[in-house]
């Protein structure tokens, strides 16, 4: 999305070595900030945090961190959250509203286990504070797009952030993007929606899988033509189209449509709308292809389908799910526009 000319004009970086003591003080003085949204993604285990401290004392290399300079000169951390937060928790836990870090799992300097920062010798406390980490500072840019792309690329491919967590954070870098993100977040808390996605595993919810399903609903509704095999790219492209103003999104109308669909689904199918069936009952976890089919079908047949009774609607839906035709459009190679439209067509015809 960012061409070479824009990058060369807008992107300037400097490499600076900050001591960990300086980083703690800059964070305390709000000269380095960690967005509250990013703080919620801080999920290293106590052992991982402890081993970072052990690595610092062993003078092992620590990967660099990346920061973006805002218009007022404040630095915002966009990559290195786990490392920076771990050190701040160890040196000054109150600054990130954490309990003191008690070291555990250190297997090279085992005498560190069970100790907090205050328990260390003065020599070790100073060594940690004075150890430097390379910080790559991306200087202020007039292009929101550059900032957005850099965050996405720096964090894509890592094991710590899910695709939706990256979308949520990166969208906030664009004017108006936070409003779209808040809409997604608010709808993920909708009672009928939560009932309908009850089969989504808890570990998916913890990584914003529920919010990704809200985004997926709107992509099914408004961006089926962008569905070209890679679901993550499809959802990225839809969100980017909205927040960069290339795709129309009337929040009031879209929210009303979402609420109508999930009121219908929750009342008639409960938690079984998006699940495979066995002996006429839903079973197993939520299946994304079934989600697409059911919400796409409901969008097409409402409000008329609401006239059928819940038992009749459930029978019709489960008959479709059990059919060979539906299996053909949800099995291998299902991530194509013809198969997406095929499974929506089948559900819409059954519920009409």
Image (cartoon, helix red, strand yellow):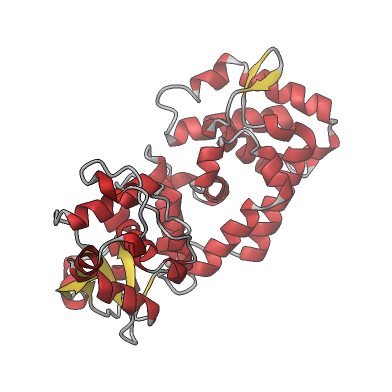
Q: How many labels does the image show?
A: 0
Residue 146, percent across and down? 28, 69
**As drawn, 121 above or below 197:** below
Q: Please name whichever residue, 265 or 194, is drawn nearer the observer in this view of the structure.
A: 194
For this view, does 78 lie left or right of residue 196? left
For this view, does 249 lie left or right of residue 21? right
Residue 324, percent across and down? 56, 14
- The structure residue drawn at horizontal position 17% and vertical position 76%, both measured from the top left corner, is 12
**As drawn, 33 above or below 216:** below
Indicate the quadrant containing the N terminus: top left, top right, bottom left or bottom right.
bottom left
Residue 262 visible somewhere in the drawing:
yes
Q: Please name whichever residue, 13 or 352, is drawn nearer the observer in this view of the structure.
A: 13
Residue 246 visible somewhere in the drawing:
no
- Residue farthest bottom in this picture: 72
State which quadrant residue 21 falls in: bottom left
State which quadrant residue 306 falls in: top right
Indicate the quadrant containing the C terminus: top left, top right, bottom left or bottom right.
top right
- The structure residue drawn at horizontal position 40% and vertical position 57%, both measured from the top left corner, is 101
- The structure residue drawn at horizontal position 68% and vertical position 29%, both measured from the top left corner, is 272
Q: Please name whichever residue, 173 or 122, is drawn nearer the observer in this view of the structure.
A: 122
- The structure residue drawn at horizontal position 30% and vertical position 80%, both measured from the top left corner, is 142
State which quadrant residue 296 falls in: top right
Residue 122, percent across and down? 24, 68
Q: Please name whichever residue, 91 or 227, is drawn nearer the observer in this view of the structure.
A: 91
């Amino acid at each position: 999305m960012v061409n070479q000319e824009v990058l060369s004009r807008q992107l300037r970086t400097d490499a600076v070595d900050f001591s960990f003591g300086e980083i703690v003080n800059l964070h305390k003085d709000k000269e380095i900030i960690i967005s509250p949204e990013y703080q919620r993604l801080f999920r290293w285990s106590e052992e991982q945090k402890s081993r970072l401290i052990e690595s610092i004392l062993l003078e092992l290399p620590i990967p660099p961190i990346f920061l973006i300079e805002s218009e007022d000169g404040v630095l915002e951390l966009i990559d290195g959250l786990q490392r920076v937060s771990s050190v701040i928790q160890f040196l000054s836990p109150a600054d990130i509203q954490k309990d003191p870090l008690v070291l555990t799992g250190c297997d090279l300097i085992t005498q560190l286990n069970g100790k907090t920062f205050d328990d260390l010798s003065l020599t070790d406390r100073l060594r940690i504070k004075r150890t430097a980490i390379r910080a790559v500072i991306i200087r202020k840019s007039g292009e929101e797009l550059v900032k957005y792309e850099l965050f996405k690329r720096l964090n894509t491919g890592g094991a710590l952030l899910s695709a939706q967590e990256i979308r949520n954070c990166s969208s906030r870098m664009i004017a108006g993007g936070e409003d779209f993100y808040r809409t997604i977040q608010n709808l993920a808390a909708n009672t009928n929606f939560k009932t309908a996605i009850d089969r989504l595993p808890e570990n998916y919810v913890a990584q914003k899988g529920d919010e990704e399903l809200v985004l997926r609903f709107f992509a099914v509704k408004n961006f089926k033509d962008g569905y070209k095999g890679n679901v993550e790219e499809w959802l990225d492209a839809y969100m980017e189209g909205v927040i960069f103003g290339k795709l129309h999104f009337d929040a009031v109308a879209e929210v009303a449509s979402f609420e109508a669909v999930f009121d219908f689904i929750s009342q008639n199918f409960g938690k079984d709308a998006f699940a495979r069936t066995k002996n006429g009952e839903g079973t197993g976890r939520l299946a994304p292809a079934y989600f697409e089919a059911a919400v796409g079908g409901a969008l097409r047949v409402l409000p008329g389908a609401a006239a059928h009774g819940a038992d009749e609607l459930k029978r019709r839906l489960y008959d479709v799910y059990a059919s060979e035709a539906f299996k053909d459009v949800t099995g291998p190679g299902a991530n194509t526009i013809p198969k997406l439209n095929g499974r929506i067509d089948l559900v819409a015809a059954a519920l009409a």
